[in-house]
């Protein structure tokens, strides 16, 4: 059992000319091209939450470094919303229950995150006396999806949703997401699209191992989840993180061809209506330890991930890999 990846949630401890926009896909280093890199402008047909990049998206991510101020001597992994707010899933002391959600903020992207504080224990809020982890927010910051083992959960963990009226208010009215959770197995690590219409998550329902599933909204509810078959293989595939265009996905896998036992892999597609291509190992961010992705900056220039590599102070720490300009 890997305490970092938590597969079973037993919580123990062809590049185009740079002057023209391209969708060049991704290579083994994790390089993709979804904007015009000469102007850094987002393409005209991009979703509303695709922003101009502060880096060259055709270049691979650099060597990961520890994110300052946010790690502890226990398990930590972080999701970043709007580039200035980090939600940390952590087993550190001082929490409200078991694994808890903590929050760290900064005033701008050139500043470091401040010291984390635990999300308050409130009725219907994000934290409970049980496991509360793996959060993902819509682009407006008003809806949060997360995994929890609190009362009414049907599997080891289920995906729940909570809402708030403003980005300075606490989340409330937490409830299980309809049509997503199975009665026996665990669902976790949700990733929600900026508009809240597409949900990716990990579940062990089909194979006994974790696989990546997708569900889309029809009206006010999600339809039945479907296995993302082109990413599935015998073993663990989990922790889906997509860019704003939903044309590139990063995920963790223990498939053959990796650097360590669990690595970050990626796959691309030309349209959201087609399947992802063959996954490739994001070699520049992986080590002989375990890694899995947790978030991507709004411009796609920073990949946040959890890692047990050398230099980690706890069982797993929050690291970031940055693309050069």
Image (cartoon, helix red, strand yellow):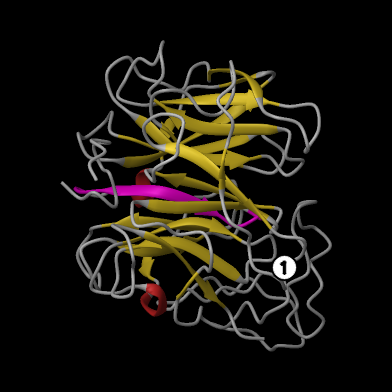
Name the quadrant of the C terminus.
bottom right
Q: In the image, is residue 134 part of the stretch drawn in magenta?
A: no
Residue 158: give x, y in percent of width and height. Answer: 41, 24
**On the picture, is 150 further left or further right than 33?**
left
Q: What count of labels does the image hold?
A: 1
**On the picture, is 223 further left or further right than 290?**
right
Depth check: give the residue in front, 199 or 119: 119
Residue drawn where x is 22% and y is 39% of the image: 209
Badge 1 marks a residue whose secondary structure is loop
Residue 276: give x, y in percent of width and height. Answer: 47, 55
Residue 152: give x, y in percent of width and height. Answer: 41, 10
Residue 43: give x, y in percent of width and height. Answer: 79, 66
Residue 191 visible in the picture: no
The residue labelled by disc 1 is 109
Residues drawn in magenta: 234-245
Where 268 sits versus 150, above or below? below
Where 266 sits versus 325, above or below? above
Depth check: give the residue in front, 34 or 62: 62
Depth check: give the residue in front, 124 or 140: 124
Examine the image and state in which quarter residue 198 appears.
top right
Residue drawn where x is 26% and y is 31% of the image: 206
Q: Residue furthest left?
A: 1
Where 99 sits versus 255, above or below? above
Examine the image and state in which quarter residue 71 appears.
bottom left
**On the picture, is 283 further left or further right than 61?**
left
Q: Residue furthest front?
A: 94
Q: Residues within 10 Å of mark 1 (few under 14, many from 20)?
A: few
Residue 120 visible in the picture: yes
Residue drawn where x is 84% and y is 62% of the image: 44
Residue drawn where x is 32% and y is 41% of the image: 211
């Amino acid at each position: 059992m890997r305490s970092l990846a938590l597969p079973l949630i037993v919580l123990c401890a062809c590049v185009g000319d740079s002057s023209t926009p391209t969708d060049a896909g991704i290579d083994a280093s994790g390089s993709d091209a979804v904007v015009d890199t000469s102007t850094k402008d987002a393409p005209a047909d991009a979703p509303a939450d695709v922003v101009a990049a502060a880096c060259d998206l055709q270049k691979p991510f650099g060597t990961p470094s520890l994110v300052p101020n946010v790690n502890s001597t226990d398990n930590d992994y972080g999701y970043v919303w709007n580039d200035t707010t980090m939600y940390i899933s952590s087993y550190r002391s001082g929490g409200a229950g078991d694994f808890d959600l903590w929050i760290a903020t900064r005033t701008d992207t050139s500043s470091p995150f401040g010291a984390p504080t635990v999300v308050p224990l409130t009725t219907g809020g994000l934290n409970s006396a049980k496991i509360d982890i793996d959060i993902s927010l819509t682009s407006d910051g008003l809806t949060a999806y997360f995994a929890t083992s609190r009362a009414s959960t049907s599997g080891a963990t289920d995906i729940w949703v909570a809402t708030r009226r403003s980005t300075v208010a606490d989340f409330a009215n937490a409830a299980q997401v309809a049509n997503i959770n199975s009665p026996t197995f665990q669902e976790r690590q949700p990733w929600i699209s900026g508009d809240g219409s597409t949900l990716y998550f990990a579940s062990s329902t089909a194979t006994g191992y974790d696989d990546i599933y997708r569900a889309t909204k029809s009206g006010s509810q999600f339809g039945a989840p479907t296995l993302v078959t082109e990413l599935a293989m015998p073993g663990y595939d989990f922790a889906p993180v997509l860019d704003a265009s939903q044309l590139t996905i990063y995920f963790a896998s223990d498939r053959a061809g990796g650097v360590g036992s669990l690595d970050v892999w990626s796959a691309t597609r030309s349209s959201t209506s087609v399947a992802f291509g063959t996954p490739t190992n994001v070699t520049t961010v992986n080590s002989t330890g375990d890694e899995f992705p947790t978030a991507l900056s709004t411009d796609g220039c920073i990949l946040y991930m959890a890692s047990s590599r050398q230099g980690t102070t706890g069982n797993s720490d929050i690291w970031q890999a940055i693309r050069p300009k």
